[in-house]
Image (spheres, grey):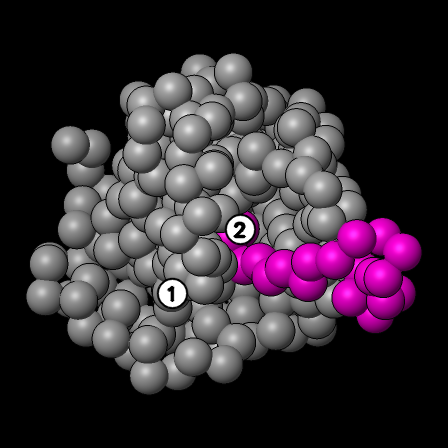
Amino acid sequence: MSDFKEKIVLVTGASRGIGRAIALELGKRGATVIVNFRSSESEANEVLEEIKASGGDGMVYQTDVADADAVDAMIKTITKTYGKLDVLVNNAGVTRDNVIMMLKPEDFDVVVNTNLRSAWLCCKAASRQMMRKRSGRIINITSVVGIAGNGGQTNYAASKAGMIGLTKSLAKEIATRGITVNAVAPGFIGTDMTADLDDTMKEAAISHIPLGRMGAPEDVAKAVAFLASDDAAYITGQVLVVDGGMVM
């Protein structure tokens, strides 16, 4: 297990689901984790308590990561408090599903702003700090929907495909400064987003997964931990798909 002691990590959207699992995994490995959240304060505090109980440290930080000024303030607070930022995990995301004829423009905007604009803003602010110390890890949580598409999710697919383009372009921009930029693309994972699906829909999705099961948030968290570690120092601009073989 990679050691993240003395590493300062920011995970956006870390109060629930995949973000929570990532924060806990890196905290368990000794990292100081900034648990970002927008509205779920009690859940974010619970995540921080678990991180501290497992040997890590950190703080909770409430902000809307689609707000440019708020993101700049968050990164400045982190670097002022801890002196640096080693790892950024862009996980914040929402869905507003519907077929395109029924999809409202505001539902497109909120998904793209929360999923893609926030990642771009956080990358921009964090990369400034990382470039100064000539090291850093950025991991963007995209989705297999951004690779293969999915009916009823044109807004979500566009945002997640955009994250892949962002990942590859930024990786080329800042590689010479010792910063790697990669993406993790989860498949059908057991989170709040999938909990409301009825059994028929779940069974239909699982039937397309060669490994024959839904993934767990921890499966994604371990992939993120690898890309954030020193073991992945020669990997950049890549998309690591964690989907049980669903879109291979």
Determine which residue is flagged by label 1. Answer: 16
Q: Look at label 1 and name its amino acid.
A: Arg
Q: Mark 2: which secondary structure?
A: strand
- Residue drawn at 34 percent across, 74 percent down: 44
Q: Look at label 2 and name its amino acid.
A: Asn
Q: Is residue 128 visible?
A: no
- Residue drawn at 30 percent across, 53 percent down: 21
| Magenta stretch bounds | 88-109
- Residue drawn at 17 percent across, 51 percent down: 28
Closer to the camera, 94 or 78?
Answer: 94
Expressed as whole percent of the image width and height from the top left, the position of residue 207 reads 42, 29
**What distance separates the C-alpha of mark 2 from that of mark 1?**
14 Å
Disc 2 versus disc 1: nearer the observer? 1
Badge 2 or badge 1: first in the primary sequence: 1
| Membership of 217 in magenta stretch | no
Q: Which mark is residue 90?
A: 2
